[in-house]
Amino acid sequence: MDTATTNKDAQGTPLGAGGHTLFDKIWNKHIVKTIEGGPSVLYIDKHLIHEVTSPQAFAGLDKRGIKVFRPKQIVATADHNVPTLNQHLPIKEELSRLQVEALTTNCANHGVELYGLGHPYQGIVHVIGPELGFTQPGMTIVCGDSHTSTHGAFGAIAFGIGTSEVEMVMATQCLLQSKPKLMRINVEGELNEGVVSKDIVLYIISLISASGATGYAVEFAGSAIKRLSMEARMTICNMSIEMGARCGLIAPDETTFSYIKGREFAPKGEEWDKKLAYWKTLFSDADAKFDTEITIDAKDIEPMITYGTNPGMGIGVSQHIPALAEVEAKEQASYEKALQYMGLEAGSNIKGQKVDYVFIGSCTNSRIEDLRMVASFVQGKQKASGVEVWIVPGSKQVEAQAIAEGLDKVFEIAGFQLRQPGCSACLGMNEDKIPAGKYCISTSNRNFEGRQGPNARTLLASPLTAAAAAITGVVSDVRELI
Amino acid sequence: MSKAINIITSTIVPLHNENVDTDQIIPARFLKATSRDGFGKNLFRDWRYENDNEATPKKDFVLNNALYAGKILVAGKNFGCGSSREHAAWAIKDAGFDVVVSSFFADIFKNNALNNFLLPVVVSDEFLNRIFEAVENNPSTELTVNLGEQSITLNETRATETFDINNYKKTCLLNGFDDIDYLLNIKPEIETYEKEHFN
Ligand code: SF4
C-alpha cells in the first residue's frame, strides 16, 4: 500500500483539520511511501556530514559506482578531529589528518560544498547548520551524529543516523524509518536566578533517566520554553538524545523566524513569505494527542550538575550524591561502579568538590550566547590557581563574533584560554583530552567513562556553573556568586 | 560472504553491565579509520586492557576470560546508548558476534546493528536474568536464536521466549538484503515525490 500523504495523514485525515502534533505535520509531509507492515520511506531535506562518520559511506557509493544524488542538500564540515590550536598548520596527528583529507577529496569528487579547516564557516556541524540558516522549520534533517537532535529547536524533525544510513541518504535522499511514539514535556513558569536551559534539560534527564524517552520523539513546550532564545532551545533539543529520544523538537515562533531571517541559506524575498506562511502552521493542534505527557514546574529546577557516568545521574548543586540506600537494590552494583570510577562518595555533597579542568564548548553550549554568559559572569574575576580553563567556540563565526565583542580580552584577563572551533574535549578525539583521574566540569553532553580521555572524570553543567567552578576551583553554587 | 541470518546456535559471552554506551563499545580515539574493517580488536578497549596496553589485559573482564566465547553477546539493559557511531556495530560484528541480546536497546544502535546483519534480540528482564544465571552455572550454556520463528531458547532447559522484529527488517536479514538496494530501486518514485515537495 502506497499512501500519498502530502495533504493528508496516514489515516486520511486532512492536515489542518486538527488533532495533529507538530511532529505528525512534518512527518506526514515527508513520506514518499509506506511499506506494508514495515517502515516508511522518509524524504530527507537536509543532510549534514563530517569527517568521522562519512568516509565509509562515500566508499560505499564509490563501490557501487554512483554519485551523491542531491549534493546541494548536503553541508559538510570538519569538526570532530580538528586541533583547537594552530589550525593554520597541517594536522599533526596522522590518522586525524588522513580522515580530514578523505573528507576533502570525497566532497570534491561528489560536488559537495565543504566548510573545512580555515573556512570562515567551519565549525561543529550542529552549530553551523543553524548559524548558516541551513536549518529551517518543517524540515527533515539528518547527520551521522546523535546530537543532530539539536536542529529540532527550529521545529524540524532532526535525528542522528549511522554510516549505512548516511550512505542511503547520499544515494537516494531517503531513509526507511518507523514512526516513533510521541511525548510532550511542558516546562511551565519562571526559571530561578542562575538557572539556564542546560539546567532544564539536565533536570529532565535526571527525572526520566538516560533511557526515559527511548522510542519517542519529544516535543518541548510550555511557557518557560517559549521564553527561551534559539541558542537556549538548541541546548535542550541537543540533549534530547541523552534521554534516549529519537529527536526533540520545539514549535517555531517569532523567536525562530527572527533568528533565521537574513542568514546565508535562509529563504529570501517572495520565497521567505511563502515559507513563513507555512512555518506558522507548524505547532501541535490543541486537540493533538501524545502517547506520554509530562509537566514540570520551572521553579523546581536549580543549577544542575552530574556526579556519575551517564547524563541521567544529575542533581541540584545544593543536593547530596544519593546514598546507597536511596538507590534501587538492583541498580546498586552499577551505581557503586559509577561512583568508584568518578572517585566520589555516595551520600556526600557535590558542592566543594575540587575541579582540575573547565571545558566550555561542544554543540550543547558553545554558541555566542554561551560565551557572552560566561564572559559577563567572569568579567573582572580571575580563575583559581591550578585550574585549566578551555573555551572552545562552536564555529569560526562564533569565534569572530566573540573577538569583535571583546570577549577574548575578558577571558584572557581571567586566565581562560580561548581556542579555535571544533568538538575538542567533548569527545577527546584530538589532543584536547582530560588526563586520567582528573575532574573536568564540562558544558558538553556526555559524562560516559573515558569520554573526555581514558579515565577522565566528567561533571556536566551549564556554562554559568562551569564558569563559577573556574573561579573558585571547586563545584560551586552560582547563585551565591551573582 | 553471505550476510543472511536465520538460525544461530552458540555459546554466550555475558556482559552484566547496564547502560553500555557506544563510547565503551568503541572509544572515540579509534574512530579514525576510513574503512569498516578491523574495529573488533578495539571492542570494549578501555574495559579490556590496563593502561590502554594490549600486553596487560584486565583479568576480570569477560572478553579476557577463556571460559566465555561465542557468537552471542548478552548484555544488561539500555545497550548501545550514546553516540550514533556505527563503528560500535562494526566492532561487535568484527569481533565475531552475530547476535546481541538485551532487555532494552538504544534506537540508533538497534538500526545500525540491523543494517550490519547483527541481530539485536530484545528479551524480558526475567529471561535476561535466566540467561545470566544459566551461563554463570555453566559457561558452555548454549542459546539458539531462530529469526524465522522469532524465538530465543536456552538449549539446556528449553526455556524459550519470542521476540519482536519489524517484518520488513526480518525479510532483509533472512535474505541478506540492504535498505539501500530497496531505496535505489524506487528512485523514480523519489523523483516524483521531489517534484511536488519542492513545488
Ligand atoms: S561537540 Fe561533542 S557531541 Fe557535539 S558533535 Fe562534536 S563530539 Fe558530538
Image (cartoon, coloured by chain):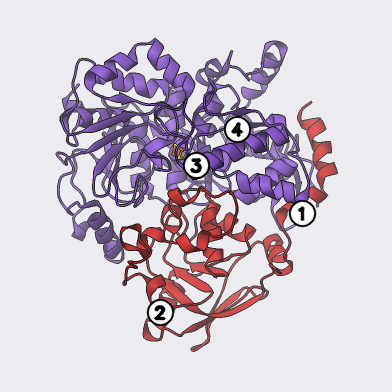
Label 4 close to label 1 by CB (< 8 Å): no
Label 2 close to label 4 by CB (< 8 Å): no
Q: Position of residue A49 (x, y in %)?
A: 59, 37
Q: Where is residue B27 in the image (x, y as percent from the top left)?
A: 43, 52
Q: Which amino acid does label 1 sit on?
A: Asp
Q: Residue B47 vs residue B91: left or right?
A: left
Q: Judge if badges 3 and 1 mark residues of a common chain.
A: no
Q: Where is residue A405 in the image (x, y as percent from the top left)?
A: 37, 11
Q: Which circle, 1 or 2, is nearer the viewer?
A: 2
Q: Which amino acid does label 4 sit on?
A: Ala
- Element on which disc 4 rests: strand
Q: Residue A24 vs residue A119: left or right?
A: right
Question: Which residue is denoted by mark 3 in the rendering?
Answer: A96
Question: Which residue is denoted by mark 4 in the rendering?
Answer: A76
On screen, residue B164 above or below B23: below
Hey, which quadrant is residue B163 in on the image? Answer: bottom right
Chain letter for the red colouring in the rendering:
B
What chain does mark 1 sit on?
A: B
